[in-house]
Amino acid sequence: MKAWSCCDYGAECGLIVFAETRGKARSEAMQHEGFDCSEWKDVEVRRLPNLDGIRNEQCALSWWKNARIYYEAGWRPQPETIGCDVCGLYEFDEFPESKVTETDDGMLCASCMAEAVKEAGK
């Protein structure tokens, strides 16, 4: 199944959809309850080939339930969201490994904190 980015024209982020064609992706996005664009002609659809094959069925991925996929696709939440100073991963309540903690080295996610502890132990 091909991955697509669906959003209002000019918007930076919207919804990741898996479908075989651009038209089916647009249709799937418009049926998703969290998608704000209501006009068919106003939906911009772009391919995300690096995410192909993650899903085998036609579907739209909720941001909050699939934060890792959105992050890996390059999408970021609002600027006021707390993020790791090393890798840039943003903190999401529904994404436990993204928990960011303030340390002497700055704000670190669990993965970067573990790496810092490992480096300090050498």
Image (cartoon, rainbow, N blue to C red):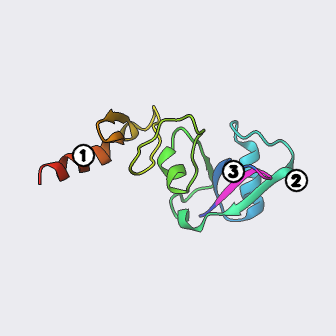
Q: Earlier in the sequence, mark 2 or mark 1?
A: 2
Foreground of the two, 1 or 118: 118
The residue drawn where x is 28% and y is 37% is: 104
Residue 4 image position (x, y, % from top left):
66, 59
What range of the chain is rendered magenta? 4-10
The residue tagged 3 is: 12
Q: Earlier in the sequence, mark 1 or mark 3?
A: 3
SS category of the residue bearing label 2: helix
Q: Amino acid at mark 1?
A: Ala
Foreground of the two, 11 or 70: 11
SS category of the residue bearing label 1: helix
The residue drawn where x is 50% and y is 55% is: 72
Q: Nearer the viewer, mark 2 or mark 1?
A: 1
Q: Amino acid at mark 2?
A: Lys
Q: Earlier in the sequence, mark 3 or mark 2?
A: 3
The residue tagged 1 is: 114
Find residue 41 and name its label: 2
